[in-house]
Amino acid sequence: MTPPGSSQAAETEHFDDLYWESRSEPIVEDDAFLEEIVAGAELPVLLAALAAALRDTTFLHPDLRPPLTPMDTTPHPHGGMTAEQREKAALLALAGLQELRDKQVTTVDMLPDAAVRDILGYLTGGREEWFGMLTHELDIAPTKGGRPAWQFDEVARGRDFSALIVGAGVAGIAAAHRYAQAGIPYVLVEAGETIGGTWAKNTYPGVRLDTPTFGYSYSFAQRGDWPHQFAQGGEILDYLRDVARRAGVVDRIEFRTRLVRLRWVEEERLWEATTRTADGGEQVRRFSAVVSALGQLDRPNIPEIAGSEKYRGMTMHSQEWDHDVDLAGKSVAVVGTGASAYQIVPAIMDQVGSLIVFQRSAPWMLPAPTYHHTVSAAFTWLRRKVPHYAQWFRLWVILTGIEGRAHTVVAQEDWPGAPLSCSPANQELREFLVSRIAPQFDDDPDLLQRVIPNYPPGAKRMLRDNGVWAAALKSEKTTLVTAGIERFTENGFVDASGQEHDVDVVVFATGFKPSDYLDEVEVVGRDGREIHAFWDGDARAYNGITVPGFPNFFLIYGPNVGGTVAGSLHFMLERAVEYSLSAIHELLRRGVAALDVRPEALDRFVEWVDEGNRTKAWGQPYARTWYQNKNGRVSQLWPYTNIEYWDITDSVNDDDYEFLE
Ligand code: NAP
């Protein structure tokens, strides 16, 4: 147990969790109340939490292991436990809550390794190959990965070494925190005025997560008191700011400072970085290593439409929402029906006078009746009263997301249902989703025909359906146009059928240019190689992190590591940060200046991810998605699970790198 009198800071340090709470509130409620709580609990999570808090493996009875039935759309409650299992688990959980109450247990301490294995064995149904990755996410595991196990001063005291971290978004905050923990001097530059990256920029009406909140946080900042099941944009931004403050990162950021040029100085084995401030002033500095935490979904894609110079109304991209524009009573056009549009449209319905939605392809949506809901009252009680319940729940969301819905998007060669589906399982999913769409449009068969997607579910990002999208499209105010936009006029658009639409405001919810990695930065590596020339529109990086010819240059959340039907984004980017630190540790330990990934290693990696992506819905030749770049290669997505990424980023393989003295 935590030593009495130890400071919160020391405990946080002990647990590698900036949100560590040393005590939960004592349980004072009666048995009837506890029974109700159990009925609202996720049983495997509660049993795991009880086993940890009471140090009692009887809560992990083998007969009550959740089967982890693969999810087609949304997670199966209790991991797919049978009714009989649920009944027995509920009785056990009730006994556990009573014991917590009667013994007044309000803390949980670091678990012994054996207990970690017992609990993970229970939760995963014995999948030992998952334990390493899951332990990375478990802040009461003594072998939790993540925090550097070494200190710069111990390895290279006196050596002149510093890193440049670029971008103060989700990835940059993680990098700065871990580099500080390793004692590596760093400078963090951010082009914007504030922390938070995409969550600071995207403030459009309705912005919120389209994946569960509890899978969307750092392993080192396991906030438990999230208000919503799918967090609102502002809540995530507050979290990021709070994490940065707790980690001591905020004070070290140079805001309004954009990286414009990087040049490798071979004789000195250093990067020369040119940054530009908002007033145009340039500064040139040298760094031993550069960590790019620049986002992919950052550069707005605004379609070139003939006559745009003629249009006299207002236009804005979803990421550049102008909150001074009053939409009240206006006629508004929203171009696009993707992840941003499906949040904007229902959110502005009440204000606008009329709405035109330009749809090029209809979106697939997963049923999510509680999409706008707060977390349940039972969850809130459990979070407050059962030590670590929220953190076990977070682990559970990540665990069940390891395989996620991946099995539904595996494409079968020569599948006759293509291009509408890509395999029997995918066809089944298609039929299920259509059966959920149809009743929402049963009074408008024509509209129904136009909102059923004509590509396989999963080939593009799937959105969440709680009925508000259908309601917005069916509103008397709304016109859904599928004819495409021909040209702008002074007052609006002409669509491809020749119909004219007058609008006051045009919202381009048309996405980004994700393949243009590092678009605005010139990066000149060894032998004068420029990174964009090397990539030629096809960004490639070994493990999504290192690029041959660019020593000590690390991309966080780089090419081919994105997820869409499975996996945790934070896990992927944290692992890239940790890998970059392992690489730096290796060169400090060897006393060498730099390391440069070998081209063969990159080729091998690309071949492997391409092979995986070719077998997925989004990798089919008939799929048109932003996951593919101009060559048609899927350069955005990681086709495997978090476990494979855990394995390949476990250590820096000597054979993959050239070490420069
Ligand atoms: P998006 O998903 O790429 O959607 C862009 C939309 O614009 C699509 O419907 C696309 O049609 C349409 N479009 C593009 N160019 C067009 C053109 N020239 N004419 C007509 N329509 C055009 O972009 P997004 O909605 O901004 O989302 C991008 C990504 O950001 C998401 O996939 C997700 O990863 C992330 N995101 C996440 C959240 C969240 O978690 N809450 C929210 C928003 C965004 P096609 O489908 O036919 O290409």
Image: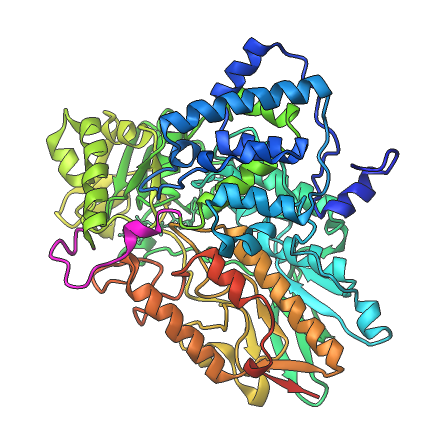
Residue extent of the magenta highlight: 404-422
The residue nearer to you, when weighing 124 against 659, is: 124
Residue 329 seen anywhere in this rendered image of the structure: no
Taking the spot 55% from the left edge, 75% from the top edge, the residue there is: 522
Q: Is residue 418 magenta?
A: yes
The vertical placement of 324 against 99, above or below, is: below
Residue 405 seen anywhere in this rendered image of the structure: yes
The residue nearer to you, when weighing 285 against 542, is: 542
Q: Quadrant of residue 157?
A: bottom right
Taking the spot 62% from the left edge, 46% from the top edge, the residue there is: 116
The image position of residue 606, as x and y in percent, is 41, 74
The image position of residue 620, as x and y in percent, is 24, 62
Q: Is residue 262 magenta?
A: no
Q: Where does the N terminus fall, quadrant-wise?
A: top right
Which SS does the magenta portion mostly show?
loop
The vertical placement of 630 against 254, above or below, is: below
How is this picture coloured? rainbow
**Could you tell whether 260 is left or right of 341 in the image?**
right
Q: Quadrant of residue 617?
A: bottom left
**Could you tell whether 111 is left or right of 315 in the image?**
right
